[in-house]
């Protein structure tokens, strides 16, 4: 028996925190309800990004509107899939992810530690904090500096390891 896709049970009004009315582009809220039909189409647009990544339950059953979310918005994940450590969550729906790596110096036959900070769009479906590890996927440019989107989230295991400590995944 094939697994039934998870859909939101009832229509829930989207979170209204902005000046403009927030609604998903792919959903017509004022549609007519047919009394005779058995199966109703969901009132929330959700898609699978593919690549073996599971759609989070918060994206399916949540009431947020985010046009840059890979699960509920108009963004395709293509290109690189990376992992990194969250070092800042101070921006609205954008986080900074630190990626550590080793660079080989041929003359000394040794490695040196280096890092890069990447600005990443984070959907409200993920409850992220500083120190968590996230999997990010490349997408089209979302702003001047943001070219990646969070697709998976692992809560922090070692809470006391500092922001600038070197960690390779």
Image (cartoon, helix red, strand yellow):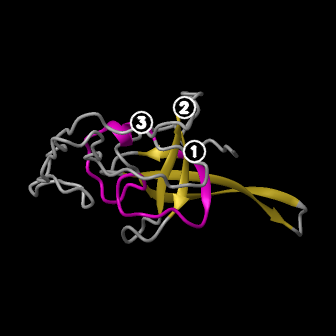
- Looking at the image, is 52 positioned above or below residue 145? above
Real-space Cα separation, disc 3 to disc 1, in angstroms: 32 Å
Q: Position of residue 109 (x, y in %)?
A: 90, 62
* Percent coordinates x, y for residue 52 in the rendering: 61, 49
Do the numbered discs 3 and 1 sit on residues whose CB atoms are within 8 Å? Answer: no
The one nearer the camera, 107 or 29, is 29
Q: Are marks 1 and 2 in contact (CB under 8 Å)?
A: no
| Earlier-in-chain disc, 1 versus 2 | 2
**Nearest the eye: 1 or 133:** 1
**Up/down of 105 relative to 156, above or below:** below
Q: Position of residue 2 (x, y in %)?
A: 55, 38
**Residue to which mark 3 is pinned:** 57
Instruction: Identify the secondary structure beneath mark 2.
Output: loop
Question: In whole angstroms, how far apart are the C-alphas of marks 3 and 2?
Answer: 20 Å
Numbered circle sitting on residue 156: 2
Q: Are marks 3 and 2 in contact (CB under 8 Å)?
A: no
Q: Nearer the viewer, residue 53 or 133?
A: 53
Instruction: Give the foreground label among 1 and 2.
Output: 2
Magenta segment boundaries in residue numbering = 56-85
* Depth check, front residue: 140 or 90: 140
Residue 73 on the magenta span: yes
Residue 167: say if magenta. no
Residue appearing at x 23%, y 56% in the figure: 27
Badge 3 crowding class, 10 Å Cα cut-off, few under 14, some 14 to 19, many 20 or more, is few
State the mark number for residue 164: 1
Disc 3 versus disc 2: nearer the observer: 3
Cα distance between the residues tagged 1 and 2? 15 Å
In the image, what residue occupies the spot 54% across and 58% down?
Answer: 137
**Percent position (x, y) of residue 112?**
76, 57
129 sits to left or right of 35: right
Is the residue marked by circle 2 packed among few (<14), some (14-19), or many (20+) residues within 10 Å? some
* Number of marks in the rendered image: 3
């Amino acid at each position: 028996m094939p697994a039934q896709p998870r859909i939101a049970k009832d229509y829930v009004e989207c979170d209204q925190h902005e000046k403009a009315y927030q609604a998903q582009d792919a959903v017509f809220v004022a549609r007519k309800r047919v009394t005779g039909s058995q199966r109703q189409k969901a009132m929330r647009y959700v898609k699978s990004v593919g690549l073996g990544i599971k759609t989070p339950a918060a994206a399916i059953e949540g009431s947020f509107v985010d046009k840059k979310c890979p699960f509920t918005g108009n963004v395709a994940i293509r290109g690189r899939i990376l992992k990194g450590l969250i070092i800042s969550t101070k921006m609205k729906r954008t986080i900074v992810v630190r990626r550590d790596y080793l660079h080989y110096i041929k003359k000394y036959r040794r490695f040196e530690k280096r890092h890069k900070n990447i600005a990443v769009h984070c959907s409200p479906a993920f409850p992220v904090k500083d120190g968590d590890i996230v999997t990010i996927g490349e997408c089209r440019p979302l702003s001047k500096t943001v070219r990646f989107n969070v697709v998976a989230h692992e809560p922090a295991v070692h809470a006391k390891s500092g922001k600038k400590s070197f960690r390779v995944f």
